Image (cartoon, rainbow, N blue to C red):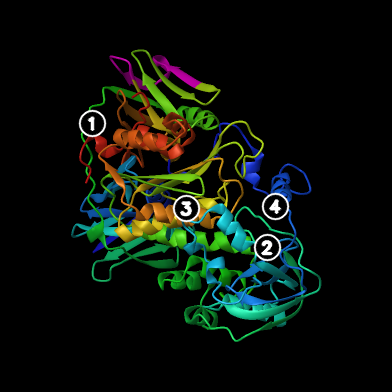
Amino acid sequence: MFQGKIKADFIKTIIDATAILVDEAKFKLMLDGVYGRTVDPAHVGMIDFKLKKEAFEEYENKEESEIGIDLEKLKGILKIAGAEDIVEMNYQKEEGRLIVTVRNITRKISLLDTSEMHDTKIPSLDLPAEIVVATEQIHQAIRAAEAISDHITLIADKDKFEMVSEGDTDVVEMQIPKEQLYSLKCEEKVKSMFPLDYLSDMIKIARGASDEITINLGNNYPVRLSFETAGGYIKIVYLLAPRIESE
Amino acid sequence: MKTKPKKFVSMDESICIKCRGAKLLCGKKRCPVLVRYYKSLETKPLVEKKVIFGSSPPSIFVGRIGYPNVYAGPMLPPIRGNTAYMDTPELWHGKEIDDIVSFRMKLIRGKHRINVMNIKGKVAEYTQEIAMASKPVEMEVEFEKKPKGVIALYDEIQPHGPSAPIKKLWISNPKVHHKIEKAFYDEMTAKEAVLWLYREGTFVSSIQKAFSTGIFGLQKKFVPTRWSITAVDDIIGKDLVEEVKQYPWLNEFRIYYTKSLDNLWVILVYPGAWQYELIEAWYPNTAWNPLGKEIVIYGDHEYFCGRNDYASIGGCYYAARLATAEMLKKERRQAGVVVLREIHPGYIMPVGVWNVRENVRKALQEEPRKCDNAKEALLFISSLLHIPIRKWIESSELLKNMLYQRRIDDYGNIL
C-alpha cells in the first residue's frame, strides 16, 4: 500500500517532465520516494527522475512496487488543482488503481499492465565538460533559434559557452563568457548538435522548475541536462542524443 | 523530430503542385492545366442521346461545388453487362493511362441538386442504393439534355465522362452488398463502419462510395466524393498506424519498388519508431508541372505523434500511408517509411489518388531488396532513381533524420 500527500506543483512538474517524451510511463514506488526512467519511442530523449519522500507532506510506503500510468489521465485530474493545493494519492495493489484526490474531488485511475513496459537503463556516458547556467538564458537562445532552424549546436570551451543555430539563410548565436556562468569545467573545446524540438521541450520544463541547469557535454555525443527543485528533493535528468551531419 | 512537421522546401516552388486544379491558387476562373487537357481531348461526344440504358459498375458521384447544396447522382456507361472494372481501381494495376481514360470516359454522370443533410427523394435514395450494390446495377436515365463534355478530370478522383442533369431515373433491383447494408442499419458511427468493413475485407473503393452517399454514421449525410476518398484513407490509415506503433521495430533496411503509368515508386522501410514521408518529384510536362522547366520536389511527413494539420500535398499522402501501414501491420512490425515517387513525362494527366494507394500496395507485395545499413540501402536506391540521391536527401526530412539523428542506444544498452 502506498499513500502520499504532495503539493500539486511538485507532482505536476514530474508528470509534465515525463509527458514531453511519452504518453505512458512506469513509475517505481520505493520506500524512500517515487522514481521513474523512460525513453521516448524514437529513443532520442530519456528522462530519469527522483521524487524523494521528503518532497511529500506525508509519505507512507510499506512495500516497493511499480505502476504503469497513462499520463493524460493523471494530467486530467491535476488540471483542477492550483499550485499550492495538496494532492493525495493512494495505491492499493489488489485494486490495480491509483486514487487521486484534489480537494474533495477523487479520480480512480485504472493502471496499465507494467509487464510489457521495459526497464530502461542509463548508458554510462563520458562527458568531459560541465556548464552550470541560468535556465532563462538557454530558453531565450532556443526561442531565437526555433524561428530559423530545427537544430542547435552547443559548444563549450575553456572560457565560454556558446549556442549556435544555422538555418537555410540565417544564423542565431549566443555566447556566455565564463564569468556570467554559475560554473564552467572544460579543458578542451567540445561541440555537439541537437534537435531543437526535444531540447526546447526539456528546457521549458527545466525553466518552470529551476533557475539553474547543469549541462554535461561531449564531442558529437549525447548531452545530459540536470536540474532540481523542491529544495533538492526532486531531481530530473534528461539525456538527448546528438545529430551528427558530418559523414 | 517528434513535433509537428514543417512545410517543405521545394527545389522550385510551383503553385500547380500545391493546387492541382482544386483551389485555383493562380487566381484564374478555371484551371488552365485542366483546360489544356480538355482541349486536347475534344472530340465528338460519345453520347448523342438523352436516354441512356446501361449497367452502373456500381458508381456514384457527389460534387463539392456549392456545398452543402451539391450535385449528386449515379454514373453509368451506355453498356450492359459486367461493367464492375470501370469503377474498381483495385483492379487497374498494369493498365495504361489510355486504357483507363477510354473506359472512364464512358461513364456518364447524372446530376441532381441535393442538400447533403437531406437524403430524401428518388434520386438521392437510388444513388444510395447503387452505392450499396455488390454487382453492376442495370438502370435507365433520362437526362434533361444531352450529356455535355468529353472527360472530367480531377486531382484526387478518377476521371469520368460527360454529365447532365437527371430528369427521370429507373433502376433494377440491385444485389445488395450485405456488409455495407449491415453498416447502414446497425448503430455504428461512420468511423466504426469504415473500420469494420475494411477489416471484413471490403474494397477501399466500395467503402468510399458508401461513405460518400451517407450510408454510414448516426447522422447520415452525403459527402463529396473528393472528401470521402481522403476521409476513408485517413480513418483506415490512422487506425492501422495506432496498431503498428505497438509492434517491435523492424531490424533491417528494405527497399520496395515498382513502375506504373510512367511513375517510379521507391519505398524505403528502415528500423525505428513509426514515421512516414511521401515525396513526389514532378518532371516538367507532367500533370501538375505542365509549365515548369525544372523538376519540382514536394513532400510531407509525420513523426510518431502524427500530424496536426492537413498534408499540403493532399490526398495522396493519406493513400500511401494506408498502404504502408497495411504492410507493417501484416508483418507485425514498426518502422520508418519513406515513399519516393518520380513522375516522369509519360504521366500526362491526373488519374486520381487510387494510383498512389494501389501502386504503393503493389510495390509492397513484391520481394524487397534487403540491406544491413543505411548506406547500402541508399546506394541501391540511387541505382533505381533518376534524380540524384543527394537531391532526395536535401528534400527529405526523414532521410536526413535517419542519417543524422543518433539514438541513445547508439551509446550503450538502454533496455
- Label at residue B320: 3
Up-down: is A59 above or below A151?
Answer: below
Q: Amino acid at mark 3?
A: Ala
Q: Are marks 4 and 3 on the same chain?
A: yes
Left or right: where does residue A47 sit relative to residue A32? right
Q: How far apart are the alpha carbons under marks 2 and 1?
A: 66 Å
Up-down: is B220 above or below A187?
Answer: below
Which element type, helix, strand or loop, lies under badge 4?
Answer: helix
Chain for numbered disc 4: B
Label 1 environment density (alpha carbons within 10 Å; few <14, some 14–19, many ≥20): some
- Label at residue A22: none
Q: Give whichever of discs 4 and 2 has the lower sequence position.
A: 4
- Label at residue B41: 4
Chain for numbered disc 2: B
Q: Are marks 2 and 1 on the same chain?
A: no
Chain for numbered disc 1: A
| Image quadrant where one finds the C terminus of chain A | top left
Of discs 1 and 3, which sits in the foreground?
3
Q: Amino acid at mark 1?
A: Leu
- Label at residue B161: 2
- Identified at 76% across, 49% down, the residue is B30
Magenta region includes residue A185: yes
Residue A59 x, y percent position in the rendering? 28, 55
* Residue stretch rendered in magenta on the structure: A173-190
Q: How far apart are the alpha carbons under marks 1 and 3?
A: 40 Å
- Label at residue A125: 1
Q: Is residue A235 visible?
A: no
